[in-house]
């Protein structure tokens, strides 16, 4: 199997063609961040957005990196295991058991370095470590 499991950029742009440019740019930048920190991630395109995970470690939940959720007025960067990630800036929202997310409304105001740190931490996180004493 190929090391590169991301969809072609043209295909992604086609999926995003009716989104406002500001939101489309956020999605494309987030996607670039995922590729930069987890180049072997698998990308799944679905009607709510995009999911990224380590296929060699499991599926979208057990080996999840992040999800880019398309909302009408913002982009939601979600982490299945977000409650276990370091978040020194307090960017993560949500009150589910483990899922956390960041809402992004503006490309220019997005904390790109902090988002890259969250994606990196998520790409390195292995939920199996929670079961060890």
Image: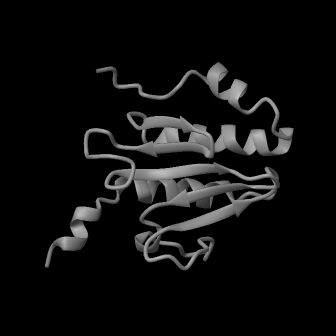
Residue 32 vs residue 47, the one in the foreground:
47
**102 left or right of 26?**
left
**27 left or right of 61?**
right
Residue 77 vs residue 45, the one in the foreground:
45
Determine the image quadrant of residue 125: bottom left
**1 left or right of 101?**
left
| Residue at (62, 46) in percent of width and height | 48
Residue 37 vs residue 8, the one in the foreground:
8
Q: Where is residue 14 in the image (x, y as percent from the top left)?
A: 71, 24
| Residue at (42, 65) in percent of width and height | 81
Q: Position of residue 95 (x, y in %)?
A: 55, 79
- Image height check: is 16 above or below 106? above
Determine the image quadrant of residue 47: top right
Colour scheme of the rendered structure: one colour
Q: Position of residue 60 (x, y in %)?
A: 39, 48
| Residue at (59, 71) in percent of width and height | 92
Q: Position of residue 17 (x, y in %)?
A: 79, 29
- Image height check: is 119 above or below 34? below
| Residue at (43, 59) in percent of width and height | 121
Residue 114 vs residue 78, the one in the foreground:
78
**56 left or right of 10?**
left
Can you say which quadrant of the picture contains the N terminus? Answer: top left
Can you say which quadrant of the picture contains the C terminus? Answer: bottom left
């Amino acid at each position: 199997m190929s090391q590169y499991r991301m969809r072609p950029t043209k295909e992604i742009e086609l999926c995003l063609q009716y989104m406002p440019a500001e939101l489309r740019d956020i999605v494309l930048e987030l996607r670039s961040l995922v590729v930069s920190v987890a180049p072997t991630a698998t990308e799944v395109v679905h009607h709510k957005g995009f999911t990224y995970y380590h296929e060699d470690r499991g599926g979208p939940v057990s080996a999840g990196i992040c999800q880019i959720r398309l909302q009408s007025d913002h982009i939601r960067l979600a982490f299945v295991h977000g409650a276990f990630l370091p978040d020194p800036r307090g960017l993560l929202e949500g009150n589910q058991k483990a899922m956390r997310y960041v809402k992004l409304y503006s490309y220019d105001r997005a904390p790109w370095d902090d988002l890259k740190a969250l994606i990196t931490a998520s790409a390195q996180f292995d939920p199996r470590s929670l079961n060890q004493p």
